[in-house]
Amino acid sequence: MQGGPETEITTDERHSSRVAFDVNDAPREMTLDNRTTLLDALREHLGLIGAKKGCDHGQCGSCTVLLDGRRVKSCLVLAVTLDGRSVITVEGLAGPDELSPLQAAFIAQDAFQCGYCTPGQLCSARGMLDEVDRGWPSAVTDDLGAPPDLTDAEIRERMAGNLCRCAAYPHIVAAVRETAATR
Amino acid sequence: MRPFRYHRPADVAEAVAVLGAEPQAAYLAGGTNLVDLMKLGVQRPDVLVDVNRLPLDTVQELPDGGLRIGATVRNSDLAAHPVVRRDYPVLARALLAAASGQLRNLATTGGNLLQRTRCVYFQDTGKACNKRDPGSGCAALHGQNRDLAVLDWSEQCVATHPSDLAVALAALDAVVEVHDTDGARDVPLAALHRSPGTQPERETTLARGALITAVRLPALPAARRSAYLKVRDRASFAFAAGSVAAVLDLDGEVVRDVRLAYGAVAHRPWRAYRAEEELRGRPFSPELAAAAADAELAEARPLRHNGFKLPLTRAITVRVLTELAARAAS
């Protein structure tokens, strides 16, 4: 469950906590070792294996989920901190037999090959489009005072936290562009 | 990862008291650096004091025109704040040039200032590092030191401070509000970070257990014309190979005031006072900017692999100031 060096077994109950938070709009409650990341809580305790463990160090983006509506890397969030908060994973982007417009666009644009990074790409793009709607600038936005125009350069910069080792980037950009244009 | 207890304090006083009573405790804010270092075994706290729910997450405009930024304001919220975008573009640009969208949504103002070096020898518990393990030596000094310091390093440590935000705050003469067991006090940002010297394990001048609660920006109308230029090995989501924060105030062609700070060159954000002195009161030209950078870097001591940082820092100084001067003229 816990990667990295020095994974010690502990039986001290002060090293665990009861924690309750919403996942995909359903209340969940569990007792977790304080070391458990949100990513491990989702995958190992709740059976939600959409979010992927790529690097486990916040560098690849494959574990991206939405926390209170904002995209974050779930491998760097400790689950014990989440009492009362709300998490949406790729499994919650649409109903069980539905596709969100973003998911449909990923299929239409052939925006993946192996698919490992795709849950993270989808959650990241979902959060990113909301950031654009709120008028947030990016590093490539020329005018900090104007609403951002979602050019391909903007999409690439804003999605820089998600790596795709199949290099499906041009199609991911196209899928995000298509989704943004039809909203 | 080492097992740890988790504590959520009710207020700042309780947070500071817990840190004072627990020698191995650490504050948890955004966690983007700390959780990673705990996974690597570099940081091994036995108690985490979670400051995320303390009421430190607002940005207030001050009556004198300055800005007070709560310590847990997220990097993304600060970069998007309308007053930051209008009055302190150098700050918005530095934040937007750092990390990725997901990380900026977690990372906090206070945590960013206290983040640890990305020196790979510090992050590898199998390597000698005086910062991680005092007295063990510095594997970086004669190792792969391309990303490390050119100014103010010591035989004990050649690490750089990785923050972009801190570089902008250094240029803006920010003041850090701190609480410790003696109460509240102000620390100028320029006095927050230390040179490595013989104690590289001590990175700031703060007492152990001190909590940053806010950062204040003084009113600085000239900062409306300011910029942050960062050069990195890839276009996005990478630490700086070199960076410069600049504020330029011209009276006609003459430099009335200028603020310059460098990133990626030293153990702390590097305010370039000597370069500013060269520029102030003289008619601006790219040649003057180059001479000012040379004056600042005169005492640099590049390591085996990072000599490129000197011409790089000089070039970005010239470019950012020339662009700001052109904006003033138009």
Image (cartoon, coloured by chain):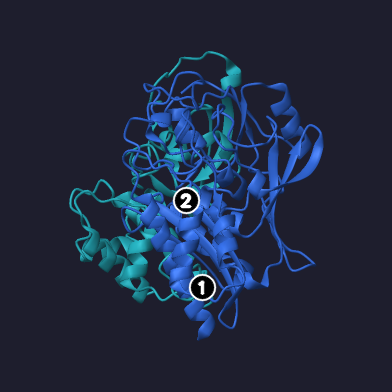
Picture quarter containing residue B306? top left
Neighbours of disc 2 within 10 Å: few (<14), some (14-19), many (20+) = few
**Which residue occupies the foreground of this view, A145 or B206?**
B206
Give the number of the disc on residue B65.
none
Type of amino acid at the residue the image marks with label 1: Leu
Neighbours of disc 1 within 10 Å: few (<14), some (14-19), many (20+) = many
Q: Position of residue B173 (x, y in %)?
A: 66, 57
Q: Which corner quadrant holds the C terminus of chain A? A: bottom left
Type of amino acid at the residue the image marks with label 2: Ala
Q: Which corner quadrant holds the N terminus of chain A? A: top left
Q: Position of residue B130 (x, y in %)?
A: 48, 24
Q: Position of residue A161 (x, y in %)?
A: 37, 52
Q: Secondary structure at mark 2?
A: loop
Give the number of the disc on residue B298.
2
Q: Check disc 1 and report the residue beneath it.
A: A144
Residue depicted at 62% across the width and 46% down the height: B110
In the figure, what tint was chain B given? blue
**Which residue occupies the foreground of this view, A149 or B284?**
B284
In the figure, what tint was chain A given? cyan
Residue depicted at 46% across the width and 26% down the height: B42
User: On what subunit does the disc labeled 2 rest?
Assistant: B
**Which residue occupies the foreground of this view, B128 or A41?**
B128
Residue depicted at 59% across the width and 17% down the height: A13
